[in-house]
């Protein structure tokens, strides 16, 4: 075979290999962008869920109510009045991402027995509340500020005895709301991230269903989709500016928001503050793993700071 034919054949093979590489790279880029886009959508638009139980299942009398956040989003909630022989104290409960107002109902029922009413909120884009993209606590703070205002219209509620209880995303929203509610009596944060951006690597596998190394890219994508920067969701930077008593509850086996995040928030917070970690508990089961200890710790904190 002549050298010219060999060169021609080698050249053809080279072009074929190059074409395969171009197709492979293009496919990888397309597939990567698809994964990033799908992950971002999962973090911005969670699948709506509805409660599996109602206050009536716990012997509680509740009213289904609605009120409007400052930016016009309609918020649905259950209002469980405080006991008539109580002090008029009420706790506002905020669930985590993908949850609903029933998520903390079992806790609310336990606290009602201790004398505290409840306002269990469906955060925006969750449950039966209005449509809006989820911002992992930033815009959701408006929902809790509206909830605080709603309670102040009820004569059976002592407006000086209102507390906020938030879990995970609800905890971030609660901290952001507390910064705008100087009259808030107490703040309870459960399984809450110190920084959304820094914790995104832990959120990715379970919620976004993508590998953790994509966290910076996915965070940039969801940050670009919001009106306000999600970089501001830094609970550890918010609590030093709060004056109300703070209770932090966290599962020691939490993989979505590792317990180190709760300890970071605690270290940054002002006194009075308490931190309780639950051995063997993860992200979703900090109450159910040890309900007696959890309830006792919560009641002791409230008895001291919201008697």
Image (cartoon, grey):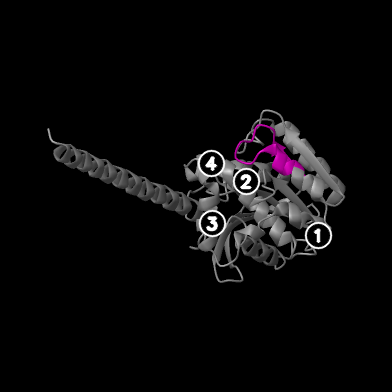
Residue 230 visible (yes or no): yes
Location of mark 4 (residue)? 212
- Relative to 51, does residue 175 appear above or below in the rendering? below
Which is more N-terminal, label 4 or label 1?
Answer: 4
Location of mark 2 (residue)? 199
Q: Position of residue 32 (x, y in %)?
A: 41, 47
Which is more N-terminal, label 2 or label 4?
Answer: 2
Is residue 254 found inside the magenta-colored segment of the image?
yes
Q: In the rendered structure, are the residues bearing label 2 and label 3 in contact, judged by CB atoms less than 8 Å apart?
A: no
Q: Position of residue 38 (x, y in %)?
A: 42, 50
Q: In the rendered structure, are the residues bearing label 3 and label 4 in contact, judged by CB atoms less than 8 Å apart?
A: no
Kindly report which numbered mark, 1 or 3, lies closer to the viewer in this rendering.
3
Q: Measure the C-alpha gap from mark 2 to mark 1.
A: 22 Å
Which is more N-terminal, label 1 or label 2?
Answer: 2
Residue 66 occupies which quadrant of the picture? bottom right
Q: Residues within 10 Å of mark 1 (few under 14, many from 20)?
A: few
**Label 2 secondary element:** helix
Q: Image point 50% across, 56% down: which residue? A: 44
**Label 4 secondary element:** helix
Q: Image point 50% across, 57% down: which residue? A: 221
Kindly report which numbered mark, 4 or 2, lies closer to the viewer in this rendering.
4
Location of mark 1 (residue)? 241
- Relative to 267, does residue 66 appear above or below in the rendering? below
**Which residues are drawn in magenta?**
248-263
Q: Measure the C-alpha gap from mark 3 to mark 4.
A: 14 Å
Q: Measure the C-alpha gap from mark 1 to mark 3.
A: 27 Å
Which is more N-terminal, label 3 or label 1?
Answer: 3
Q: Measure the C-alpha gap from mark 1 to mark 4.
A: 32 Å
């Amino acid at each position: 075979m002549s050298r010219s034919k060999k060169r021609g054949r080698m050249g053809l093979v080279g072009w074929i290999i190059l074409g395969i590489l171009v197709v492979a790279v293009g496919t990888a880029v397309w597939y990567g962008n698809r994964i990033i886009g799908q992950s971002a959508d999962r973090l911005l638009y969670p699948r709506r869920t509805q409660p599996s139980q109602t206050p009536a299942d716990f012997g509680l009398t509740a009213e289904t109510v609605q009120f409007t956040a400052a930016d016009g989003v309609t918020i649905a909630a259950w209002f469980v009045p405080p006991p008539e022989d109580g002090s008029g104290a009420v706790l506002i409960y905020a669930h985590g991402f993908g949850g609903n107002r029933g998520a903390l109902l079992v806790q609310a029922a336990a606290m009602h027995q201790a004398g505290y009413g409840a306002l269990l909120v469906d955060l925006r884009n969750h449950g039966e509340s209005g449509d809006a993209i989820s911002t992992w606590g930033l815009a959701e703070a408006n929902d809790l500020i509206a909830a605080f205002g709603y309670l102040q219209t009820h004569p059976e509620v002592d407006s000086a005895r209102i507390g906020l209880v938030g879990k995970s995303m609800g905890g971030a929203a609660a901290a952001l709301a507390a910064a705008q509610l100087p009259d808030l009596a107490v703040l309870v944060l459960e399984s809450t991230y110190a920084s959304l951006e820094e914790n995104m690597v832990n959120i990715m596998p379970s919620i976004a269903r993508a590998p953790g190394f994509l966290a910076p890219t996915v965070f940039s994508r969801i940050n670009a989709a919001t009106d306000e920067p999600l970089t501001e969701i830094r609970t550890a930077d918010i609590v030093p500016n709060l004056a109300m008593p703070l209770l932090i509850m966290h599962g020691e086996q939490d993989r979505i928001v590792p317990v180190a995040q709760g300890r970071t928030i605690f270290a940054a917070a002002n006194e009075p503050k308490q931190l309780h970690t639950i051995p063997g508990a993860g992200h979703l089961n900090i109450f159910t793993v040890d309900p007696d200890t959890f309830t006792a710790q919560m009641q002791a904190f409230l008895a001291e700071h919201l008697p």
